Image (cartoon, rainbow, N blue to C red):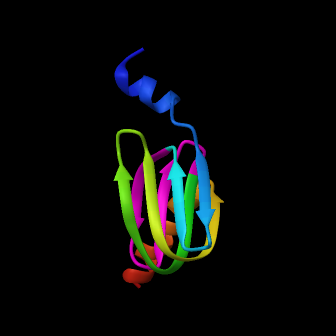
Amino acid sequence: MDKEQTLMTSLNHNITISDRKNIVITGVKKIESFDDEEFLMDTSMGYVIIKGEALEVIKLDTYQGNVSIKGKINQLSYMENSSKKDKEDGLFNKLFK
């Protein structure tokens, strides 16, 4: 088993929200997109969308897959991989109409 494969299998996924102001996510493979109102992340358990206000990254550990975000958290949801493609297609369709 190579180093990358070992890292991917060892990514445990947890989410901890404190006072609706801070969120810590483990098991993050990649941050697909983010701004001050929305984060889209690929985790070991699927894609996660976090929506809120004044969101910003406090800590990013790409080696261990840990992300800390602060701001007002309004929504957290998981989506299937096919939904991500549908969302991207919808965005491009809106841009080029």
- Across and down, in percent, residue 5 comes to 43, 25
Q: What stretch is highlighted in magenta?
A: 28-46
The quarter of the picture where residue 3 lies is: top left
Q: In the image, is residue 16 above or below residue 44?
A: below
Q: Is residue 43 above or below residue 52?
A: above
Picture coordinates of residue 13, whole percent (x, y)? 58, 44
Residue at x 55% of width, y 54% of height: 47
In screen coordinates, is 24 left or right of 59? Answer: right
Residue positioned 51% across, 59% down in the render: 85
- Which quadrant holds the C terminus? bottom left
- Residue 2, quarter of the rendered image: top left
Return the residue nearer the eye: 55 or 46: 55
Most extreme residue toward the front is: 19
Q: Is the magenta stretch mostly helix, strand or loop?
A: strand
Q: Does the magenta stretch include residue 59?
A: no
Where is residue 49? Give x, y as percent: 55, 65
Decide which of 10, 58 is in the foreground and name it: 58
Residue at figure coordinates x 59%, y 60% from the top left: 83
As drawn, which residue projects farthest toward the top? Answer: 1
Quadrant assignment, res 6: top left
**Would you say residue 34 sits in the magenta stretch?**
yes
Q: Which quarter of the image is occupied by the N terminus?
A: top left
| Residue 61 left/right relative to 87 | left
* Camera-side residue of 88 and 18: 18
Q: How many labels does the image show?
A: 0
In x, y percent, where is residue 10? 51, 29
Seen in the image, is 45 located left or right of residue 92? Answer: right
